[in-house]
């Protein structure tokens, strides 16, 4: 793994991409570059009332971008660091330790790859999917991502466009509370897995999101014949 370093980074972009979710871009100090693996994360250090707090966020940017990085940040009640980042202005600076984490893309060989996420658990899959398209474009690659409402969906147009341009890629957004007119998947990510992926014996499966979802999907993978050692998880 790449040794982590603590750097002071500067906000150069901040825009909402879904309800209560912002997409932020940070630049590094002059002369510094960033090396990381798809799936790794950065830990932010912020001070509140003389106490230092830490909060971690997965990189959504790709490793080729060495002079900046990008994150998805969700605004949550009483979430001091996340709300501070969502409200950040261009030029604001933050102390960050990076890269960290072992939830990284494994060599798939001839196996298919399934990504399962809810909410901002989608974040580490941006660079992972990029890496697969670059290095393993013929491998079947699928993304199942769950939200409540359409306004909670993160960059659906980007993934829909990717599905059209990459023959091996499939995108399954699923809504648990669909509005009238929604024609896509309904229910939860587990429902889509059972409908679309009844046999996971030749898959690598990556799961990221809140602990309850991750645990349930991991158990489901066993039922769907996923082999031990090919299910990788990250709990937020």
Image: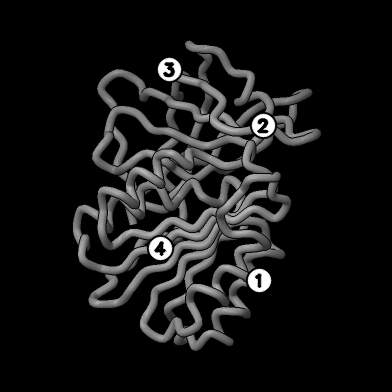
Q: Position of residue 46 (x, y in %)?
A: 63, 28
Q: Earlier in the sequence, mark 4 or mark 3?
A: 3
Image quadrant holding the N terminus, namely bottom left
- Is residue 156 found left or right of 153 in the rendered image? left
Q: Which numbered tag is attached to residue 20?
A: 2
- From the top left corner, tell me how far across and down residue 84 is, in percent: 66, 24
The residue indicated by pointer 1 is 215
Seen in the image, is 189 located left or right of residue 75?
Answer: left
Distance between the Cα atoms at labels 3 and 2? 19 Å
Residue plotted at (48% across, 76% down): 197
- For the residue pair 1 and 15, the one nearer the viewer reads as 15
How many residues crowd mark 2 within 10 Å: few (<14), some (14–19), many (20+)? Answer: some
Q: What whole-number distance in Å separates the C-alpha atoms at marks 4 and 3?
A: 32 Å
Q: Earlier in the sequence, mark 3 or mark 2?
A: 3
Image quadrant in which you'd find residue 210: bottom right
Q: Which residue is mark 3?
A: 12
Q: Is residue 118 left or right of residue 36?
A: right
- Going from N to C along the chain, the mark reached first, 4 or 1, is 4
**Secondary structure beneath disc 2?**
loop
Q: Residue at x 33, y 59 (%)?
A: 169
Image quadrant where residue 171 sits: bottom left
- Circles 4, 3 touching at the beta carbon (< 8 Å): no
Residue sitting nearer the eye, 70 or 164: 164
Q: Look at discs 4 and 1 and give the one toward the viewer.
A: 4
Give the x, y percent position of residue 70.
Answer: 43, 33
Q: Is residue 43 visible?
A: yes
Helix, strand or loop for disc 4: strand
Q: Nearer the viewer, residue 80 or 186?
A: 186
């Amino acid at each position: 793994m790449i040794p982590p370093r603590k750097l002071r980074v500067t906000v150069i972009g901040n825009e909402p991409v879904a309800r209560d979710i912002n997409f932020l871009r940070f630049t590094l100090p002059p002369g510094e570059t960033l090396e990381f693996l798809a799936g790794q994360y950065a830990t932010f250090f912020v001070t509140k009332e003389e106490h230092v707090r830490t909060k971690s966020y997965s990189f959504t940017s790709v490793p080729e971008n060495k002079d900046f990085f990008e994150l998805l940040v969700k605004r949550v009640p009483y979430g001091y660091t996340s709300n501070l980042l969502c409200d950040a202005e261009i030029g604001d600076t933050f102390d960050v330790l990076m890269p960290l984490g072992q939830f990284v893309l494994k060599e798939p060989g001839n196996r298919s790859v399934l990504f399962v996420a809810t909410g901002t658990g989608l974040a580490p899959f941006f660079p992972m999917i990029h890496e697969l398209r670059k290095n393993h474009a013929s491998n079947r690659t699928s993304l199942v991502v769950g939200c409540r409402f359409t306004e909670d969906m993160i960059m659906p147009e980007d993934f829909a466009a990717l599905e059209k341009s990459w023959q091996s890629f499939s995108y399954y957004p699923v809504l648990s509370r669909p509005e009238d007119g929604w024609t896509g998947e309904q229910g939860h990510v587990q429902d889509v897995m059972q409908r679309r992926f009844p046999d996971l014996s030749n898959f690598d499966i990556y799961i990221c999101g809140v602990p309850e979802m991750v645990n349930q999907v991991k158990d489901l993978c066993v039922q769907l014949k996923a082999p031990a050692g090919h299910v990788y998880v990250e709990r937020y």
